[in-house]
Image (cartoon, helix red, strand yellow):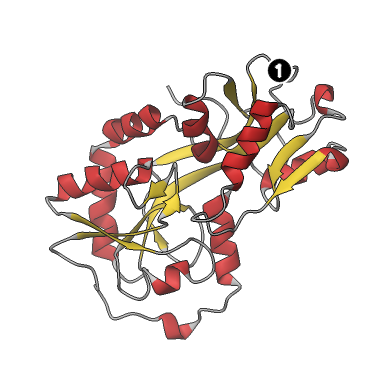
């Protein structure tokens, strides 16, 4: 998944002791968000992504105006935004890495298959389905589904797309879905929060969550907010807001088209 892989790659950059921060750098007069300016449908500098909607919601609950520090996700994102003290929270970050302190997770989502609704693979629900054999399948290189597809003997059928690009000038997700729509690809296996909102806007495409996979690597991830490691009180404040406003958070995500699943990736969240 995008945010999880970003965390792993950033760990390899060796941020070390130099990243230590003075306690409580956060603003008490603004809700300062660290975000990618061109990561639609998650975030965008026109505030059109669902993470922007969540930021606006949290800012309202806190009684603070929302401000942004924009930086492309990839190498240096956390170091030059959150750890630099330029902003105080990353709205969407995968649970379980050491670059940030995670809040409690506020949603869980899953990879899925995007196909044309009238396509030959529209009924596929598992990556081991024989119908996928000899079909061109789009996948983001290095993501968990690529491992599953390779294990299923579909390596020769995979068409890889780059994970880390400057999306101000390139749009691999848009390109992939456009190729599914045109028939150049029979399917694409992509992260739900990226694909779901885009598919919702296109009546010819469908997104089917992968809920029946039983082998590793897992295809579901719990998403948190990220704050600096020493800011325990800030984390507790955000955790309280998440707990008290979960229904409203779910509604924002569902309205955007984000597929929500239970905490174990086995069923759609009721």
The residue under the point 73% across, 32% down is 185
Q: What x and y, as percent, mark residue 132?
A: 80, 27
Res 69 quadrant in image: bottom left
In this picture, residue 158 sits left or right of residue 213: right
In this picture, residue 55 sits left or right of residue 202: left
Q: Nearer the viewer, residue 214 or 167?
A: 167
Tell me if I can see residue 213 in this picture: no
The residue under the point 37% across, 40% down is 50
Mark 1 neighbour class, 10 Å CA radius: few under 14, some 14 to 19, many 20 or more: some
Residue at the extreme bottom? 18
Tell me if I can see residue 10 in this picture: yes
Res 128 quadrant in image: top right
Q: What x and y, as percent, mark residue 195?
A: 54, 35
On the rendered image, what quadrant is the C terminus found in?
Answer: top left
Residue at the extreme top? 118
Say which element carries label 1: loop
Q: What x and y, as percent, mark residue 43?
A: 39, 48
In this picture, residue 64 sits left or right of residue 202: left
Q: Nearer the viewer, residue 119 or 243?
A: 119
Q: Which residue is mark 1?
A: 119
The residue under the point 29% across, 64% down is 88
Q: Nearer the viewer, residue 67 or 168?
A: 168
In this picture, residue 162 sits left or right of residue 199: right
Q: Is residue 129 above or below residue 24?
A: above
The residue under the point 34% across, 42% down is 48
Q: What x and y, as percent, mark residue 154?
A: 84, 37
């Amino acid at each position: 998944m995008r945010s999880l892989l970003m965390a792993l790659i950033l760990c390899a950059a060796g941020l070390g002791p130099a990243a230590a921060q003075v306690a409580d750098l956060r603003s008490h007069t603004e809700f300062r968000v660290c975000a990618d300016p061109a990561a639609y449908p998650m975030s965008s500098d026109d505030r059109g992504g669902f993470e922007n909607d969540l930021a606006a919601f949290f800012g309202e609950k806190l009684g603070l105006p929302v401000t942004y520090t924009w930086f492309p996700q990839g190498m240096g994102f956390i170091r030059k935004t959150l750890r630099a003290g330029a902003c105080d929270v990353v709205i969407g970050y995968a649970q379980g890495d050491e670059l940030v302190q995670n809040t409690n997770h506020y949603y869980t989502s899953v990879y899925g298959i995007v196909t044309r609704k009238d396509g030959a693979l529209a009924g596929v629900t598992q990556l081991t389905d024989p119908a996928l054999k000899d079909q061109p399948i789009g996948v983001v290189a290095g993501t968990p589904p690529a491992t599953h597809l390779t294990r299923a003997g579909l390596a020769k059928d995979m068409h890889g797309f780059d994970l880390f690009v400057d999306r101000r000038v390139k749009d691999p997700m848009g390109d992939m879905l456009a190729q599914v729509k045109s028939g150049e690809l029979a399917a694409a296996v992509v992260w739900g929060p990226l694909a779901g909102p885009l598919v919702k806007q296109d009546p010819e495409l469908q997104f089917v969550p992968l809920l029946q996979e039983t082998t590793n690597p897992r295809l579901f991830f719990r998403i948190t907010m990220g704050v600096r490691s020493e800011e325990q009180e800030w984390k507790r404040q955000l955790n309280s807001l998440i707990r008290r406003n979960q229904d409203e958070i779910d509604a924002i995500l569902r309205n955007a088209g984000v597929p929500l699943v239970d905490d174990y990736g086995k069923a759609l969240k009721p």
